[in-house]
Amino acid sequence: MSDINFALVEETRPPIYRAMKYWGKKPHNIWSKYIDNYTPKGGCFLDPFSGSGISILESFRLGRKTIGYDLNPLTSFLIETYFTEFNLENFENEFNSIKQKIQNDSIYKKYFSTVCKNCGEVAIAQHYKDESSTIYEIGVDCKCSKKYLLKKPDEKDHNTKALSEKIELKNWVPDLNFPDSESFTDDFKNKLNNKFYNLWSKRNLYVISEIFNKIENQKNKKLQKQLLFGFIQTIHLCTKMSPPRREKSNRPHSTSWGRSAYLYPNRQMEMNPMHVFESSCLGKQSVKSCYASIATYFDKKPVLAESHSNIKSNAIKNFDIKYGVINILNINDHIEDKSIDFIMTDPPYGGLVKYFDLSLIWLIWLSKIDSKYFPDLSSEITINKKTSNIETYKKRFLKSVQNLAKILKDDGKIVFTFHNKDLKIWNAFLKTLFLSGLKIEKVIHQENKRSGESNVSMPYGTSASDFYIRCSKGAAKKLNTSNEFENFVINKAIEIIAERNEPTPYQFLLNGLLAEISQMGFDLDNFDSNIQKVLDQKVNLIFLLTDNKSNKAGNYWWFKNPSEYIKYPDKKLTDRVEDTLLALLRRKVSIKLDDAIGEVFEKYPNGLTPDTKSINKILEKFATKSGGKWHYKAQDLEKDYTEHTNYIFKLISLGKKFNLKIFVGKREQSENYKNKKLSDFTDFTDVNFLKDFDKKRVKRIEMIDMLWISNNNIVASFEVENSTNFISGIQRGSNLNIEIPKIMLMPDKRKKEFENITDPLFGDQFKKFNWSFMYYNDLDKTLENKNIKLDEFLRTTTKL
Ligand SMILES: C[S@@+](CC[C@H](N)C(=O)[O-])C[C@H]1O[C@@H](n2cnc3c(N)ncnc32)[C@H](O)[C@@H]1O
Ligand SMILES: [Zn+2]
């Protein structure tokens, strides 16, 4: 097993994970790779905070023994429901019988009817859009049109709405006040009379309770679960909390519960629950599509074992999936010590998302069917001004991780995902690991959402990404309490920017720094741990800031005096990424965008990760897109390589004529020349003959196109710039001593371009590091001259 030491690329979710809403759903394919890599065949995987259950399903799919708990009963409901036997015909029949009942219901007909402007007949309202409680638009479901129509409300529509508030309910609805929690502001509670059921308009509540009543009376318990599944996907979309989508989105007939909060927007969308229920049961992302996905996603049905909080279940061994509403603080009643091979989990990040409060909207209904679905609100690990402060959070979290350390095998691993921007929470988290006897092996910055073209508008920053923190057992290094923190941050920032060798947006710098700081194990409690502040002190002393107009990732950070901090310059990161992608295209010819992102993540981890949004632009340069793949423009680009290789070969020949030894750059070594590799014609494939050179420096020198060597000394170096950027070419040369002649060789046709370089830095560097240039034609002439000597040849090159 080799470790995963770089970020992976998120794939599109299969329908099974799209049906149910949950906050912070994790990328299934990435978790699958981790579980597969770190849980041996036959081994046991655990996720104690499994939320929507993705990790449980992925682990089971991989054939691992799986334990997935969560104190939120919704997780148990989902696991139970996913694996009930599904019969589409029965399901559709049941659905239709509910639909008929509602459609024939006189109250439904009365309060959802509206006159169709298209045909003048009475039709059904699919939704109402309100502003300050007044309807301004209605979606119409009329026989005269296949599509839903839109209309402006008329007198009757306004009256119907007013009257609907007096509807008498026939069935049970949950009669619960909002709990005491910062999720529910006083203003919110007042507006809704402090009752959950007032989240829905009266007519919506009527329809919902009718649907629920039908489901409650369902005798077939499997079918009941499946209908409930459709039901809970429906109800959060029919409240007063969902605003209409912006007009730009061009989706006037649907809404979403977009923010993870209880809100009372001024503009509201009152969806007809029957329509939402239909699409939740049978639509694109529905119960139906979910089960179709399940049927092919798994090759068998799991043996399920449910753990109950009041009965120890650690002895239960016969299961594929052990699940249940288990508080992590009691997890040791259910799992033996040192029995778990791998734990991967996504713990609550402080109080960022209030999982229990948010899930109540579903659980208040589910728990009418089975009281086990009501959550133990007081035990949630979170921070909530009204119920639990940071101290409670820290205490509970520490106990949690200690419990996990106990049940983990001695050679087992834990991967935590984490993403709070608040350094206090970070610190609590890191300290917890330390106090639980865990040692951080690796911190990887992992972009979460897909970074492909579909997401160009996605925000930068830690919210769009996670840190994956891999730990093993064994005493951690002592926490670093010294005042070294500030120095560490500054030095690391310098290192990151220097390594990138280009102005770096703040967000990229911060992501790199957080990974480094975590790995170091600082105890940040006792001094100012604000990274931004630490760095700000050095602005205009070490760093220079410039505006970033091209994206939202923050100002560009660069050096006031670059040469002071960049000891062994490489090409700019952007140019290196370009080279990497070009090399990938040449190797594979056709690639998917994800292959490109994956390669970049692997080669440029953490602080070195470039803006993934730039990848598309680079690909456009070197490839054409069709059929979802990028195809290398070989016809246009290979000519350049051939010419480049030809001239390198000419330089090899010339060097040999001077009785010199030859080194060709790492990248060029494998290029083809007359059915051989270029390296077949050279004396060295590395520069290890340079004694006492820093490793980094050696690496840079090895990327230079060509070196001529005599008695283990470099006597001349070359960059052949057939089509590549002149400026990036000279960066690496400065890793050689100044006096070594450095020659830039280029096609005659680039003369104008070369003469027009205006960058003053280029000229300075060119002169300072003893560069000169020559054109292909000049070299060809030299080669014809049989008696030429090295000195003479060098004199034919031109200085600036
Ligand atoms: C960040 S979420 C996990 C989301 C999950 N990774 C997913 O893909 O859906 C954290 C979870 O911790 C659960 N949780 C909070 N306190 C808990 C406790 N004391 N014991 C067990 N689970 C708890 C919450 O219900 C929530 O589902
Ligand atoms: Zn009509």
Image (tube, rainbow, N blue to C red):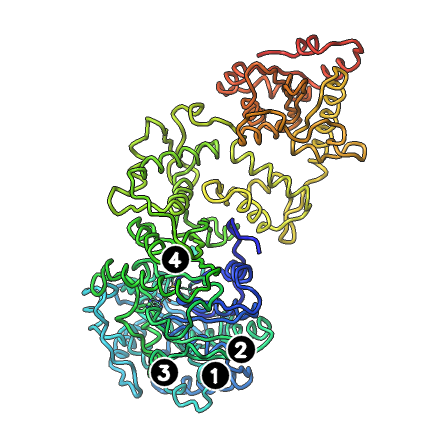
N-terminal of the pair, mark 3 or mark 2, is 3
The percent position of residue 482, horizontal first and vertical second, equals 29, 40
What is the C-alpha distance between the residues marked 3 and 2? Answer: 42 Å
Q: Is residue 12 visible?
A: no
Residue located beneath label 3 in the image: 108
What is the C-alpha distance between the residues marked 4 and 1? Answer: 32 Å
Relative to residue 311, is residue 664 drawn left or right? right
The percent position of residue 211, horizontal first and vertical second, equals 39, 83
N-terminal of the pair, mark 3 or mark 4, is 3
What is the C-alpha distance between the residues marked 4 and 2? Answer: 43 Å
Residue located beneath label 1 in the image: 95
Residue located beneath label 4 in the image: 246
N-terminal of the pair, mark 1 or mark 2, is 1
Residue 498 occupies which quadrant of the picture?
top left
Relative to residue 452, is residue 565 drawn left or right? left
Pick whichever, 612 or 738, lies toward us.
Answer: 738
What is the C-alpha distance between the residues marked 3 and 4? Answer: 29 Å
Residue located beneath label 2 in the image: 302
**Label 1 with label 3: CB-CB less than 8 Å:** no
Q: Is residue 24 visible?
A: yes
